[in-house]
Amino acid sequence: MTLNITRIFKMNNSRKKFDTICVKDSSKFSKFAHTPPIFASSTFIYESPEKAIEVFKGNQESFIYGRWSHPNVELVEEKLELLEALNTPLELKGFLFSTGMAAISALFNSVLKPGDAIIAQGNIYGTTVELLNAVMAPRGIEIHYVDFDQLNQIEDVLAKHQNIKLVYAETPSNPTISCYNLKEITSLAHQYGAKMSVDNTFGTPYLQQPFLFGVDFVVHSTTKFLNGHGNALGGFLVGKDIDFMKNKVWKERKLHGAMMSPFDAWLLNNGLKTLSLRMDRHCANAMKVATYLEAHPLIIKTNYLGLKSSTYHELATSQMFDFGGVLSFELKNGLNASLHLMQAIKHCTLTASLGTADTLLQHPATMTHYNMPAKQREQYGITDGLIRLSVGIENVEDVIEDLDQAIT
């Protein structure tokens, strides 16, 4: 049975709730300033030695040291927990990290130990592949890359390897913009005793809420759409198991020194205030650009979930509220055409990131996915002719005109 999440949104008036959560700040940390201040302090004070003793014993809650936590991150953590939990009865616990990769590392380190195994799709973010191959595998973690389009392959690997503790999905995927069935994959993971995690960076909780489908963990690079302005790094990991998050994950962040800075948290909070407005425009612009690219004679394929020609259109319609701001397309003339495009653009910006207010363009095979094994890149459609485009919120005609003059 297809879950009609659009109907759920209308019934619960969740769009309004979402916007309000994004905009309003808790007065918990400042009762006098309209905009929360930046708490630029490395440590925090106590009114008495007795209070300090109780805090360090764990009998009372208080801020201790900026590497452990601080007001700016807790304010945003509470906001993101609420956004990810909308439309569910769940209480979630999440933690902000200095980068998205720090959040992903904390997930892997918390769930996996030497001798355990993980299943990941083959077309995830290139640095996540590098982390698995270069760091986790040498530590004794077994890595299984599987085509997540093939549910029978996922089940086959789960059945054959009893040591699989985590299934790691990224949907929509980077950079092929594939969409995977979260409900079915989560069900398989749980059937065989594994936890299910999803990188929701491309979707954001505004477009996709994985906890509706039973997942255990969601991870974000907040550097991207959540911040939205390209001015601060960050990551977020949120989960259903409150005790696990407060003990295992929090300790990972504390001991590895992976805390987000007060200033970056402050910038992230400012970005969140316009998240829904920005995502609506990103989606609308991306649809127009994808429609233009799909009809272009020099383009073999356009990957965008909003196109009815997309293999994933029906699934994305049932699983997401809209189709996102990122697309990719494959040029007929391969690497030469890609190099020409990158040299010829005038409006779009050539850079490795995504999710900012302006349109960003990059070539995965030579940039973000360069360190992924070439065979794996080709297997999952990350060809030399593939270009990833993060469509901004500017006038979309400027984006289309720039692409038109640069594609050869």
Image (cartoon, grey):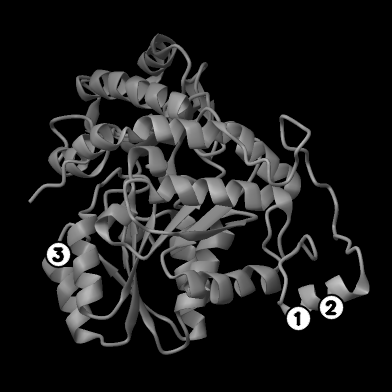
Three-letter code for the amino acid on which mark 3 is drawn: Leu
**Callout 2: helix, strand or loop?**
helix
Circles 2 and 1: CB distance less than 8 Å? yes
Where residue 11 sits, quadrant-wise, is top left
Circles 3 and 2: CB distance less than 8 Å? no
Which of 241 and 128 lies nearest the eye of the viewer?
241
Q: Residue at x 53, y 26 (%)?
A: 349
Which of 63 and 177 lies nearest the eye of the viewer?
63
Q: Residues within 10 Å of mark 1 (few under 14, many from 20)?
A: few
Three-letter code for the amino acid on which mark 1 is drawn: Lys
Q: Residues within 10 Å of mark 3 (few under 14, many from 20)?
A: some
| Image disc number at residue 151 | 3
Q: CA distance from mark 3 to mark 2?
A: 53 Å
Q: CA distance from mark 2 to mark 1?
A: 6 Å
Three-letter code for the amino acid on which mark 2 is drawn: Ile
Location of residue 52 with respect to 11 vertically, above or below: below
Q: CA distance from mark 1 to mark 3?
A: 48 Å
| Image disc number at residue 260 | none
Of marks 3 and 2, the one in the foreground: 2
Q: Residue 162: image x %, image y %?
A: 26, 87
Location of residue 155 with respect to 176 vertically, above or below: below
Where residue 170 sits, quadrant-wise, is bottom left
Q: Residue 48: image x %, image y %?
A: 92, 69
Q: Locate residue 205 relative to residue 26 in the image: left or right.
A: left
In this figure, which residue is indicated by the disc labeled 1? 57
Residue 408, visible in the rendered structure? no
In this figure, which residue is indicated by the disc labeled 2? 53
Q: Earlier in the sequence, mark 3 or mark 2?
A: 2
Q: Residues within 10 Å of mark 2 (few under 14, many from 20)?
A: few
Q: Residue at x 22, y 80 (%)?
A: 192
